[in-house]
Amino acid sequence: MSLVELIAQADERGLAASGLACLDRCLPLLGGDDEALRPLWAGLAGNGDWAAGLEQARGKLAGEDATGEDATGPDGTGEAEAVLLARRMLAAAPAELSAAAVREWADGCSVAALRIHRLLDPVADGASSVDTCREGRTDGASPLVAAELRRQVAVLELLAAHGAGGLRGALEASVEGRRVLRAVVSRRARGRG
């Protein structure tokens, strides 16, 4: 089943987890520590208040991005655009987890996270568009984009199969993806230095 189909069939918790997982994997671009989104994960598990956790996360991540650059300035590498996309994911997160709000947010986060990975992938050659990948046609997708796509699919499948019980697996997939993106950002920073 394609990512687009999985998003269309997901319930509110699955959609919220999908959007949150995309944002979580992009934390290295926002300069946040690994615990910055933990209150949101707790809120999805029923152990916290989503709206309060969102406000807290926005406060923690409001500072300078991980690159130390103005996210709107041209840097020639796509990193500034990637940071801006990550900031928009956080800004667009709904305070209330209604079906319509989380569906729109999850879909937007999916596209943004794939675009971020495409922008930062050193071997991306433009052969496969983000929309094409989301529809299940991954020929020509760069390794970083293909891995992000697999993680997005895995999160939605885990939540569809296990409900709230799938949140731990979704978080684990996000932690793995965050480590990968952190390594990419670090390599790029060393290349500039």
Image (cartoon, rainbow, N blue to C red):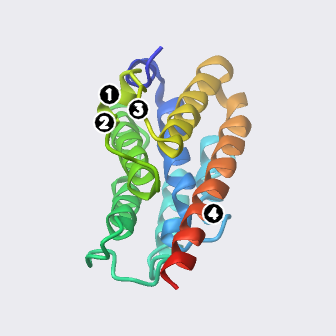
Q: Residues within 10 Å of mark 2 (few under 14, many from 20)?
A: some
What residue is shown at x 34% (from left), y 64% (from top)? 78
Distance in Å between CA atoms under marks 1 and 3: 10 Å
Please report whichever mark, 1 or 3, sits nearer to the chain's N-terminal start. Answer: 1
The answer to whether residue 4 of the structure is visible from this angle is yes
* Closer to the eye: label 4 or 3: 3
Residue 189 image offset from top left, x and y in percent: 53, 77
Distance in Å between CA atoms under marks 2 and 4: 24 Å
Residue 59 image offset from top left, x and y in percent: 48, 74
- In this rendered view, identify the residue nearer to me: 59 or 2: 2
Q: Which mark is residue 183?
A: 4
What residue is shown at x 43% (from left), y 26% (from top)? 138
Amino acid type at image mark 4: Ala
Drawn side of residue 16 relative to residue 134, left or right:
right
Please report whichever mark, 2 or 3, sits nearer to the chain's N-terminal start. Answer: 2
Please report whichever mark, 4 or 1, sits nearer to the chain's N-terminal start. Answer: 1
Drawn side of residue 4 relative to residue 158, left or right:
left
Amino acid type at image mark 1: Thr
Q: Which mark is residue 173?
A: none
Distance in Å between CA atoms under marks 2 and 1: 5 Å
Please, what secondary structure does the residue beneath circle 4 have? helix
Amino acid type at image mark 3: Gly
Task: Determine whether label 2 and label 1 are within 8 Å by CB.
Answer: yes
The residue beneath circle 2 is 129
Distance in Å between CA atoms under marks 2 and 3: 9 Å
Distance in Å between CA atoms under marks 4 and 3: 23 Å
Distance in Å between CA atoms under marks 4 and 1: 26 Å
The residue beneath circle 1 is 132
Query: In the picture, residue 81 is in which quadrant?
Result: bottom left
The residue beneath circle 3 is 140
- In this rendered view, identify the residue nearer to me: 76 or 101: 76
